[in-house]
Image (tube, rainbow, N blue to C red):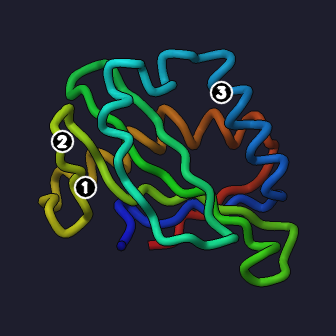
Amino acid sequence: MGQIGGTYSFHTSKDTLERAIDTLFAKYPEYKMPQKWEQYNTLKPRPASYLENKYFYFKDQPEEMYYVVLIDNLVMTGDSSRAGLAIRAVNTGKSKWLLESALGYGDERRIAKRFDTEIISKLQQYTGAKVRKEE
């Protein structure tokens, strides 16, 4: 499974990034998966000890939800000073999740920009970490 819009590498630990995500959901509960969208929580990712599933919901048009993985570099590479996020799929309120291969260039750019603006910028503020986007 590829990623949509690249990987966001935070110069901080997985625990710090997880706390920042918890803070984001506490301050902006509208980004949490609403109950009516739980039926789309059907993705069964390959088990990997260095990945953790996260979902970000966007109510404003276009209404959609992003399946995102939190990447624990400590488990993957032994580097506890970095953690990452990558969008793996998008759901538009239908039973099928859209992978990178199913999206056009314009949609992929729009999704990445939305995630940058609404999510990554806040997480960067909460962690105080530098963020590098890796295409």
* Mark 1: few/some/many CA within 10 Å (<14, 14-19, 20+): many
Q: Is residue 121 above or below residue 62?
A: below
Closer to the camera in the image, 68 or 96: 96
Amino acid type at image mark 3 = Leu
Closer to the camera in the image, 104 or 91: 91
Quadrant (top left/top right/bottom left/bottom right) for the N terminus: bottom left
Q: Residue at x 49, y 24 (%)?
A: 31
For mark 3, what is the residue?
Answer: 24
Quadrant (top left/top right/bottom left/bottom right) for the C terminus: bottom left
Q: Residue at x 59, y 38 (%)?
A: 121
Q: Earlier along the polypeptide chain: callout 2 or callout 3?
A: 3
Amino acid type at image mark 2 = Ser
Which quadrant of the view contains residue 125? Answer: top right
Q: Earlier along the polypeptide chain: callout 3 or callout 1?
A: 3
Marks 3 and 1, how far apart at CA: 23 Å
- What is the number of the mark on residue 95? 2
